[in-house]
Image: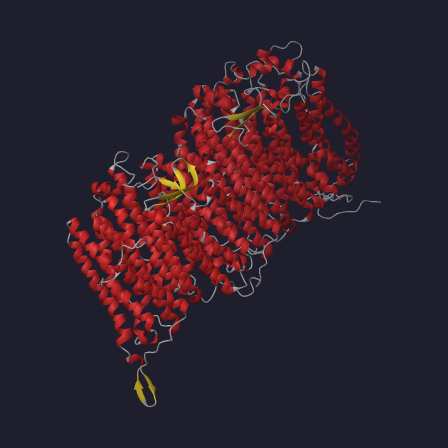
Amino acid sequence: MQESTFSAVPLVAVLLPWVSLLAILAFPKRAEKLRLWLCFLGSLATFGVVLSMLPGILDGNIYTIKLASVVENLEMRLTVDTLGYYFGLVLTFLWLLATVYSISYIDHKHNRFFAFMALCESFILGCAFSANMFTYFIFYEMMTFGSYPLIIHEETTMARRAGYKYLVYAIAAGTVLFFAIVAHYFWGNGQLGFGRYGVLSLEFASRAALLTVFFTYLAGFGVKAAIMPLHGWVPDAHPAAPSPASALLSGVILKAGAFGIIRVCFNVFGVDLMRELKVYPVVAVLACITIVVASVFALTQDNLKRRLAYSSIGQVSYIILGLAMLAHDGALGGVMHLAHHALMKGCLFLCAGVILVKTGKKNISEMAGIGYQLPITMICFSVCALAMMGTPPSVGFVTKWLLGSGSLEAGLPVYIVVLLASALLNAAYFLPIVYIAFFRWEGDEVEEHGERHHPKLVFGKEADHELVVPVVILAALVIIVGIWSNVPGFPYSLVSKVVNVIFP
Amino acid sequence: MRLLHNYHYAAAMLLFCLGLHTVIVRRNIIKKLIGLNIMETSVFFFYISLGYLEGGIAPIRTGGADPARMVNPIPQALILTGIVVAVSVTALALSMVILLYRQYGTLDVDRLMREEEPEAGESGKEG
Amino acid sequence: MGAWRHFPIFMITVPLLGAVLLPFLGYVREKWVPYASLLPLGTSALLGVLLIGRIPSGGYLSYHMGGWEPPFGIEIRLDYVGLFLMLVVCGITTLALVYSRRYIEKEVSGGRRTAYYVLYLLMSGAMLGFVATGDIFNLFVFMEILALSSYALVAITGNRNAVRAAFKYILMGAPSSIMVLLAIGFLYSVTGTLNMVDLAGRIAESGFTEVLIVSYILLVVGFGVKAALFPLHMWLPDAHSIAPSPISALLSGLLVEVCAFALVRITLSVFTMRASDLVMGTADAVGVAAAAAVLYGGIMAILQKDLKMMIAYSTVSHIGYIFLGLTAFTAEGLTGAMYHMLDHGLAKACLFLCAGNFIYLKGYRRIEDLKGAWGQMPWTCFAFALASLSVIGIPPTAGFISKWYLILGNVEGGKWLYAAVLLAGSILAAVYCLRVIYYMFFQAGKEGAWEEYWHDAPPAMLLPVWVLSLATLFFGVFSFLIIPSLLKAAAYLL
Amino acid sequence: MKKVAALLFISALAVLLLYVVASMPPMGDPDNPTATHVIPRYLERAEEETHTVNVVTGVILNYRGYDTMGEVTVIFCALAAVLAVLGRERRGVIHGFVDRSEVPASVIVKTMVRFMVPFIILFSVYTILHGETSPGGGFQGGAVIGGSMIIFTTIFGLYESSRRIPLKVRAPLEGAAVMGFFLVGSLGLVGGGNFLTYAWPRVAQGLHPSLVVWLTVLVEVGIGLGGAMVLTSILFAMIREEEEIAPAS
């Protein structure tokens, strides 16, 4: 890799979402459509700017810009390395689609929702582009509070309760994380930056100290990444939030936690130190438990979004499991799953949103025959559901394949059992939805002209374009990315560069 | 016995404790203020004793007085300030007592503090 | 040596002189008093700003009053940290004064208004003198001006609760002043000097250990009452919540801080050399008290129904933060404590002024009444939210930076428990602050509680609030302007 | 219970303080730190350095003049505080003093007071002006004037005394002490020294000793007048009743 070069582009990318905010502040009451489309433009521009860095990143450039420096080792700096860029690209893309979707979806208090959407995008992009834990933490905390209004947007009792739970978890996690970073700073000889092979070492600190740092980090990020005992807020927050927000929660905000763990494993501790400390079995066990148990919980949920939320909990732990394998393919699969899951789960939540908007149905048991009312949506839903199970050719399959290969590489085939179990459970909770949607229409029989018949397959009754287009794009990408993952800008092209360096 | 030799100081300390006791235990706010003044006076006494010199004379340089025999002028100067401060605090406290008596009709500190507050929203508006 | 050498003394005396001259204006044109009182404080602030960069972070500016060299005359000894605090004082007092005009017109009856501004200037000048002085008796004198003016300012509305709170404050404050005086007497009796630097040297050689320890304890108790350290804080919640809001802002945002600072200075630069054997025992006790303060203040704040009461208890908690930074005895901890004085001053002043806006406009004091406040008073509510974030310590506000250094300092000092307490304190802060924010922004107000349209406080009251809340953000993002110098200065102090 | 706790606490404090007293340097010993450290210079050189014979005055006004400046600010602050709490009489309206005592003051008392007060004030003037050569000074003199006003007011009532020292006389003089200090202090700056420098380094050889003495006396007079007026005003504010009585015309 080359030395990092100064560039203002990361800062521009982080600040661009604020354009949307300015648009809202400029016309808080007038020109509603214009204002919302300006928000979309802000999001689009952000994505464009991030995309413009792609050639450079693929050449191995690192862009960096120092924002502020408290003291020598404690600085706010944005650095776009390949890993950060990968996350940034995924999130800005998903954000773009969610923003489009929201324009039609959100029906009250647009200003607040879009303002905080924009703020959150800016903050998470800051997370992705952080050069060190200090910066990461700052953006991470801001993101935590910025996403609160998104969760409680509906302002129902359920949403308030979910928001409250979210805050409790997030603040506790933030505190633990804060402690972790202070401890890291203290024992890491003031090195908070992300090193290519990790920055901590046993030279400066004892084993116990490093273990403390690791597990406080794990606990701190684990709340966002919904590792099992810490997942409590997720199943409440997702159903309560408006669908685009749920998609972002699942697709991006959970990933911010997972991304933090990736950073901790790769760039703070480094693979060698992880091996030396022997922490990976604990992590792997936690991840496995999460994967299986969350899937079992998902089976029991009738609320669609709640089921999806539990599914997310399990899926994010794929990433953690991939890391814990400490093997090339495992890491590759895990990190790539960050994007894969964002695509799939984003699509699924948006589908759930379409269903809610068009039919007002939240529970799976009410959805009989819905595939005929909303054919495009439900086809996309089915595609993603199949992908979640790991059906080729889709991104889900790529993940599963790589993770399986990684577990063999790590010499622990037991992970394959977990993966298979997870795939089965995924099938068990996703296929019924597809089945109910397309093949069970008893419940929805209507009586007309004296005979009972089922609603016909009617195209054109679909929801607005703003709602459907993002869904279709995501579903298409689930397949396309699954097949051609090496296209520049697609996950493999970026992640393999990172992982190849770490596991030569 | 240093304690007996320093009996001025010891007396000042006892006076100080007496004053503090009055401030803490007495319920009448005027008596509390008296206790406060006893405390202050004890400290003044302590300071002045600090400046004392065995067989000393006033620190005024007239008629070839021997500087080595003069008592220490600094505590005297300091305590002048102390007295002024004490007077000022007492004046302020007394004026508050006047106001409190007008408003509550009692000097008993327990009853003063126990007195129900008017509705919380009102308290800022009066005056 | 240029004219700037004389700036510190003018920073102190100009507000005092202004206070003396203000009544004259009061007789002639009472309406001009609020504006005229800005002049001396503005002058002080300007002089302070001009001093920036003159004092190296390891050095100090020593000004000999009357030309007498230190042990004989009184010295103003202004190091980097002191100047930093003086600037904070100037800034916050000026802003709260801008705020005062409208608020005082409503809350304080005519005859007392001039007295309000006189006392306000006296208090500001006294704080400046208090921070700058290098003589321990002079410290006492300024502390008394400070105390007297604050007693009176708490009572200035003249309503019975206010007078009662002020009297409670006197009953605790006056004995504590006497304790300080007694402690100074003890110190003088065994050293024969009052200059702080000289004292440090003499204490290091002195053999009267018992006297020194007891005088230190008395000083801690005396200043502890003024700084509202936990078991001695009883006066604070009443006084701070009942005083007019700009005064609450000063009391909470500055007064307790400068008193804590005095204790910091006495601990570090008077009892220096023998810190290990003399001060440590007391300092440990202070640490325990401070940790208790953090938790107690936080919990009590959660239990409050009155907004200003809640903010006042939050101050109790944050004083604990400052003392925990001090008792860590590391450069980072001290830096954290100093920076916390800045950000707590700004944030708390802002919160109190916001609470004042609600009282001014609607007369609402209870937290419950603030449900749905956002609809009518968005600017106030946003400022409140921003300042709350700093109180909690959410990045990128200044509260985060200070918390960072406080915790780092305690970790470096090996005081893990205190680091945990600090974290717990910030969780408590999150609970009580976010509750208010939640009410403001996400709850519907009662029918008729708020106007339908935006009707926020007048600009003269919004401006200080916004300047303060943006300053918490500014000093969070641009902490690098100050932190390195503070670190150096702190290392020098230790 | 509370009383017992207080008593225990106080006893513990007393024991502690007495213990400290027992370990303090012996009282009156010429080898004490208080008698050996800073003092000798004051005692030996005060006369030539401050041109005051009374070393206490030299310390108060010159060596530690800044403290005294703070002190006069404290008095002024006390006045402002009392007025903030109790409020002040309005201009042009004299407040009546309701005599509540059972026995009205007799003619003898009235005559004696009328006779004595000028002498008391004369004495206080002496105390103020002679502060730098003999025991006394601004504070003492001011306090004596204040005392004389207390006597006068208790006997003749607020109406009479506030006619003798009306608001328009008192008000400008209340800040006299602080202003005097500020004036002299700033003059010191003009003279090339630091704030509160009496001997002006910029003037060759410094000021003439008698000028220094005059400056000292100026400050003393300021303190005396200021103190007296503040005490009087505090007194008036305290005994003022709520009801306001129009001047007898």
The image quadrant of residue A486 is bottom left
Tell me if residue C12 comes above or below residue A126 in the rendering.
Answer: above
For this orientation, the residue located farthest to the bottom is A450
Task: Please tell me which residue is depicted at 30% across the width and 39% down the height of the picture.
Answer: A199
Question: Does any portion of residue D55 appear in the rendered image?
Answer: yes
> Is D144 on the left-hand or right-hand side of C438?
right
Camera-side residue of D51 and C478: C478
The image quadrant of residue A76 is top left
| Quadrant location, the N terminus of chain C | top right
| Quadrant location, the C terminus of chain C | top left
Camera-side residue of A388 and B114: A388
Tell me if residue C310 comes above or below residue C70 in the rendering.
Answer: below
Camera-side residue of C384 and A204: A204
Camera-side residue of C467 and B107: C467
Image coloring type: secondary structure
Whole-percent x, y for residue C148 in the image: 59, 37
> Is C403 on the left-hand or right-hand side of D62?
left
> Is D167 on the left-hand or right-hand side of D199?
right
For this orientation, the residue located farthest to the right is D249
Whole-percent x, y for residue A298 in the image: 27, 64
Whole-percent x, y for residue B72 in the image: 57, 18
Task: Please tell me which residue is depicted at 18% across the width and 55% down the height of the picture.
Answer: A404
Whole-percent x, y for residue A164 in the image: 39, 58
Question: Does any portion of residue D105 appear in the rendered image?
Answer: no
> Is D229 on the left-hand or right-hand side of A65?
right
Give the tally of numbered discs. 0
